[in-house]
């Protein structure tokens, strides 16, 4: 398996993935024109021809038969071209001394505080390929790319995880809150937001803090809770150092998790090493390996053996990375527990 930049020739494969992802995945629309535009923009991004505010690093996961089986992405800086809103969870304390009553009421504050940060997004792996290390490779490869090019990104990486919604696409949080101000169903509002049409949020959403006790019990229960399908992605990112700091999506109340880039494990613990070709021993850990290129970026996960300043891999791995012995790579063990074995 290899993670590489998406190309225009991947259009048909991405359309197939989009159809499997369904209508809720707004950043991967089953629309040839929109996908084609995004692919062209991604090519410009990897060629370093766009500003950080417009950067869309779109990756695909490709197997050894050159079949595209997954997609993931990084946004260079959110909120600089289009407004980027969330709610921040806070607390309002009301006290009546005469009555001896003190109430702590959870409160939602509309904000743009993530403006200028970078986002990991658009993660989707074909259901038939959700096995082995495929999901972790597709997700964490982006973090190793950031480790190589930190100047292209903000101070933090954030991930807006999908919140609770039923099979018909109805969100209890939206039904209890957003519907009152937008007069449209959840899927329509989410679709408009995915298209980049976010001005309507500022125009229609109240600016005053909102008390969560006024929401239905069902809506209160899903605040900050990730959809079951988003749990694997959440676990992977949290293992890398992401955490929920009280920000949620304004539509479905899914958690927005974040991490300072220097604190992310794959960034902090990655090393630059010289590639060596041979046969790693039977107990060699799995490493995430990046060929240190931008436009021709290639990242893979493979058994590798650390020998001083050299990383020993087999010939097929070097071929996947399009590298020769002695070439420089950036690498980190794929799992934290294997990192300790590699260092031993």
Image (cartoon, rainbow, N blue to C red):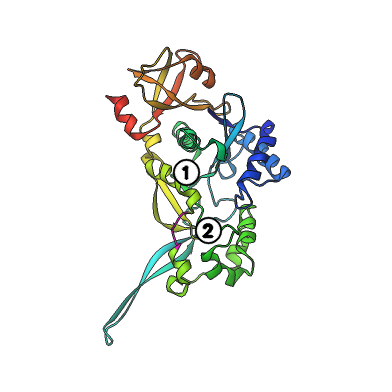
- Residue at image position (46%, 65%) is 109
Could you say where residue 178 lies in the image, as x and y percent from the top left?
56, 67
Residue linked to disc 1: 154
Mark count: 2
Q: Which disc, if any, is residue 96?
A: none
Could you say where residue 73 lies in the image, as x and y percent from the top left?
55, 40
Residue linked to disc 2: 85
Is 86 magenta? The answer is no
Q: Is residue 313 left or right of residue 308?
A: right
Could you say where residue 205 lies in the image, as x and y percent from the top left?
56, 68
Q: Is residue 48 visible?
A: no
Q: Is residue 1 above or below residue 308?
A: below
Q: Quadrant of residue 180?
A: bottom right
Q: CA distance from mark 1 to mark 2?
A: 17 Å
Neighbours of disc 2 within 10 Å: few (<14), some (14-19), many (20+): many
Closer to the camera in the image, 307 or 304: 304
Q: Is residue 147 visible?
A: yes
**SS at mark 1?**
loop
- Residue at image position (53%, 70%) is 176
- Give, as a single range, the part of the protein colored magenta: 222-226
Neighbours of disc 1 within 10 Å: few (<14), some (14-19), many (20+): many
Q: Is residue 54 left or right of residue 112?
A: right
Q: Is residue 81 above or below residue 328?
A: below
**SS at mark 2?**
loop
- Specify the quadrant that holds the C terminus: top left
């Amino acid at each position: 398996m290899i993670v590489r930049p998406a190309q225009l020739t991947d259009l048909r494969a991405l359309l197939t993935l989009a159809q499997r992802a369904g209508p809720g995945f707004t950043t991967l629309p089953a629309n040839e024109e929109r996908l084609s535009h995004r692919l062209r923009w991604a090519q410009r991004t990897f060629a370093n021809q766009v500003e950080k505010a417009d950067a869309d690093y779109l990756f695909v996961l490709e197997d050894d038969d050159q079949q595209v089986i997954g997609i993931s992405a990084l946004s260079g800086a959110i909120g600089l071209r289009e407004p980027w809103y969330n709610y921040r969870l806070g607390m309002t304390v009301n006290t009546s001394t005469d009555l001896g009553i003190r109430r702590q009421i959870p409160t939602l504050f509309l904000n743009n505080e993530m403006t200028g940060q970078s986002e990991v997004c658009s993660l989707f792996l074909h259901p038939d390929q959700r096995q082995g290390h495929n999901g972790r490779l597709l997700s964490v490869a982006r973090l190793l790319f950031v480790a190589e090019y930190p100047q292209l990104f903000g101070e933090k990486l954030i991930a807006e995880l999908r919140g609770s919604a039923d099979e018909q696409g109805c969100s209890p949080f939206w039904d209890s809150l957003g519907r009152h101000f937008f007069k449209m169903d959840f899927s329509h509002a989410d679709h408009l937001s995915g298209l980049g049409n976010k001005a309507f949020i500022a125009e229609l959403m109240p600016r005053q803090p909102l008390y969560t006790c006024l929401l239905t019990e069902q809506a209160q229960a899903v605040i900050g809770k990730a959809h079951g399908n988003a749990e694997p992605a959440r676990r992977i990112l949290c293992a890398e150092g992401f955490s929920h700091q009280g920000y949620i999506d304004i539509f479905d109340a899914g958690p927005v998790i974040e991490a300072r880039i220097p604190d992310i494990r794959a960034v902090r613990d990655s090393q630059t090493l010289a590639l060596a070709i041979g046969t790693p021993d039977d107990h060699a850990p799995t490493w995430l390996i990046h060929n240190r290129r931008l436009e021709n970026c290639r990242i893979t996960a493979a058994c590798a053996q650390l020998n001083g300043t050299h990383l020993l891999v087999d010939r097929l791995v070097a071929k996947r990375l399009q590298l020769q012995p002695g070439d420089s790579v950036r690498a980190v063990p794929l799992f934290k527990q294997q990192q300790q074995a590699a260092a031993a």
